[in-house]
Image: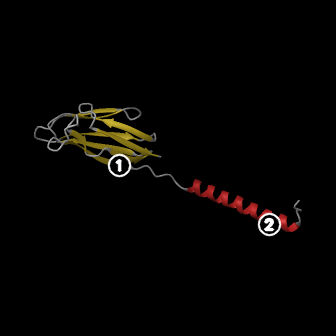
Amino acid sequence: MASWNTRNLLIATVLLAAIVGAVTGLAACYLAHPSPTPQTRNIYLFAQDLSFSAPSNLNSDYIYSSNQITVNKGDTVTIHFYNPTDQAHSFTIGAPYANDVVVAAQSTVIQNANITITTSQAGSFAFHCKFHPPQMTGTILVQG
């Protein structure tokens, strides 16, 4: 059985103090690390016509110019949605950012709409065009 003489007690105390100090230091660094400051973000999203090169297995000849939008929790995001095609398109997203905006087909001027949301909840949120599923889809990824 080990005896706890002064030397062993001193070594154990120093080791315990080092462990407690390391854990406390890591916790302080974690708590001091600021979360990203909310930003105002402008995202430009276009409806695109793929009719000239779309694979024959697609049910739709249209896509969004970007199928993933990544932002931080707390950001104010304005999506500038443009439709330069000859078909109407929508930007439809469910709760908690519920929006259903239809942009008409172009005549002589490209049609557009602006959708503004404040990203109060982190997660992955699907958006789609209600006229051209299943290809015209995307995701807003809210980090935070």
Give the x, y percent position of residue 63.
Answer: 24, 41
Q: Where is residue 98, by image quadrant?
A: top left
Task: Specify the farthest residue to the left.
Answer: 108
Where 33 sits versus 114, above or below?
below
Residue 129, given in percent of the width and then of the height, sits at 27, 34
Image-based side of 139 in relation to 123, left or right = left
In the foreground, 58 or 107: 58
In the drawing, does residue 67 fall left or right of residue 1?
left
- How would you rate the neighbour count of disc 1 (Cα within 10 Å): few for under 14, some for 14-19, many for 20 or more? some
Figure quadrant of the N terminus? bottom right
Residue 72 percent location from the top left of the image? 43, 47
Q: Which residue is mark 2?
A: 11
Give the SS element for disc 2. Answer: helix
Colour option used: secondary structure
Q: Earlier in the sequence, mark 2 or mark 1?
A: 2
Q: Secondary structure at mark 1?
A: strand
Q: Residue at x 75, y 63 (%)?
A: 15
Task: Report, in whole angstroms, how far the alpha carbon at label 2 lies from the one at label 1.
Answer: 55 Å
Q: Residue at point 84% right, 64% down?
A: 9
Residue at the bottom extreme? Answer: 7
Q: Which residue has dot 1 on it?
A: 41
Q: Residue at x 33, y 37 (%)?
A: 127
Amino acid, disc 1: Arg
In the visual, does 110 lie left or right of 78?
Answer: left
Q: Residues within 10 Å of mark 2 (few under 14, many from 20)?
A: few
Residue 10 coordinates in the image, percent (x, y): 82, 66
- What type is the residue that disc 2 sits on? Ile
Q: Are the residues flagged by discs 2 and 1 in contact, CB closer than 8 Å?
A: no
Q: Is 114 in front, or is 7?
A: 7
Closer to us: mark 2 or mark 1? Answer: 2
Indicate the quadrant where residue 65 lies: top left
Comparing 65 with 71, the one in front is 65
